[in-house]
């Protein structure tokens, strides 16, 4: 059963199957290899002694990794589960409650507050579902016994770097079973690249400080190429007889307008040279969307059309009172 809460990055990680569980002694030998690699990369011995003390395989992480669903939600099912009426209401409430902070963050990073709130809401249900797995043991388990071993080994080393830089005590470094951390659900590599302290002092705290959560989300989008003042896309209606493929290359909006494509609200497309791509997430008989550069930025956060459209849809519901 898939919960309506916390359907974010960890749900959408595509991971391949791993090998059978090995004996604890083998894991210890493997972990000693990680320790040597970390030392060779400049991570201090005291950090490793502290962060790796008592680390063992987590059977629950292995179970969750191997229980990844084989069936795929349809686009309609995904939107229904992720962008619920309740989540839309709560998003509006959080936008109002945090308006001053969000406006300041948005102005600093060039990202509209509604997109910050939408990502926060979809990733962790506005901070309600952040995960309670110890990140370092979880990543060690996945790197050793799980799927995509090289990816998770790299993230484990990044988690050790975070501890080494005194960003957080390893005992308080909690996240999803797949290692995504805090209210923004950053993997350790993303934390190192994009997490920021809004105040500019101390370590970024994406677990507890809402200002750091918002600033880190906005910094990620900004650094990924977010275009200030622009939206993500428009839901469109296709004229009868037009049967494009599920995704097309970028074309000027005027070209799409000439094909007879209109916004679903009945308004014509803007007569400008800005390029857009047409995507049909449910196939040629489903809804269509013309998407812009900011949509592609959302794909850098999570390379899923469903996810990016859900974020855009929730953000658009916050655009007007």
Image (cartoon, rainbow, N blue to C red):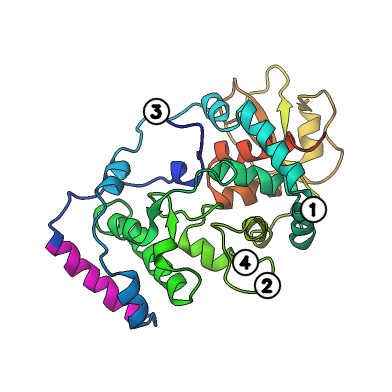
Q: Is residue 59 above or below residue 31?
A: above
Q: Which residue is mark 1?
A: 100
- Callout 2 crowding tier (Cα within 10 Å): few <14, some 14–19, many ≥20: few
Within 10 Å of disc 1 (Cα), the crowding (few <14, some 14-19, many 20+) is few
Is label 1 or label 3 in front? 1
Task: Tell me the residue at 53%/42% (across/down).
Answer: 304
Q: Which residue is mark 3?
A: 1
* Residue at numbered disc 2: 200
Using residue 181 as the reference point, say whether residue 62 is left or right of it: left
Q: Is residue 280 above or below residue 174?
A: above
- Residues in magenta, as a range: 25-39
Which of the 4 image quadrants contains residue 90? top right
Q: Is residue 248 visible?
A: no
Residue 21: x and y in percent read 17, 51
Q: Earlier in the sequence, mark 4 or mark 3?
A: 3
Residue 141 visible, this orientation: yes
Question: Per the image, is 233 magenta?
Answer: no
Q: Earlier in the sequence, mark 1 or mark 2?
A: 1
């Amino acid at each position: 059963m898939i919960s309506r809460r916390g359907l974010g990055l960890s749900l959408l990680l595509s991971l391949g199957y791993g090998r059978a569980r090995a004996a604890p002694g083998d894991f210890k030998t493997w972990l000693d290899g990680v320790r040597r690699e970390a030392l060779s990369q400049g991570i201090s011995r005291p950090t490793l002694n502290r962060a790796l003390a008592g680390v063992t395989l987590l059977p629950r992480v292995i179970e969750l990794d191997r229980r990844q669903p084989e069936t795929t939600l349809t686009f309609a099912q995904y939107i229904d589960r992720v962008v619920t009426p309740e989540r839309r209401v709560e998003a509006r409430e959080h936008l109002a409650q945090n308006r001053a902070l969000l406006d300041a963050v948005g102005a600093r990073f060039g990202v509209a507050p509604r997109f910050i709130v939408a990502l926060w809401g979809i990733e962790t249900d506005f901070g309600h579902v952040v995960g309670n797995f110890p990140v370092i043991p979880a990543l060690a388990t996945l790197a050793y016994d799980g799927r995509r071993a090289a990816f998770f080994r790299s993230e484990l080393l990044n988690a050790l770097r975070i501890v080494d830089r005194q960003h957080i005590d390893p005992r308080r470094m909690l996240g999803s079973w797949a290692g995504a951390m805090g209210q923004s659900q950053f993997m350790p590599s993303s934390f190192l690249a994009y997490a920021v302290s809004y105040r500019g002092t101390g370590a970024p705290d994406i677990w507890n400080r809402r200002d750091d959560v918002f600033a880190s989300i906005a910094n990620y989008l900004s650094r990924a190429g977010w275009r200030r003042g622009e939206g993500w896309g428009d839901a469109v209606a296709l004229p009868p007889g037009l049967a494009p493929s599920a995704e097309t290359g970028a074309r000027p909006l005027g070209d799409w307008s000439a094909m007879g494509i209109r916004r679903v609200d009945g308004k014509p497309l803007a007569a400008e040279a800005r390029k857009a791509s047409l995507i049909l997430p449910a196939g040629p008989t489903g809804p269509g969307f013309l998407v812009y550069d900011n949509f592609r930025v959302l794909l850098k956060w999570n390379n899923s059309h469903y996810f990016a459209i859900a974020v855009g849809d929730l953000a658009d519901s916050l655009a007007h009172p």
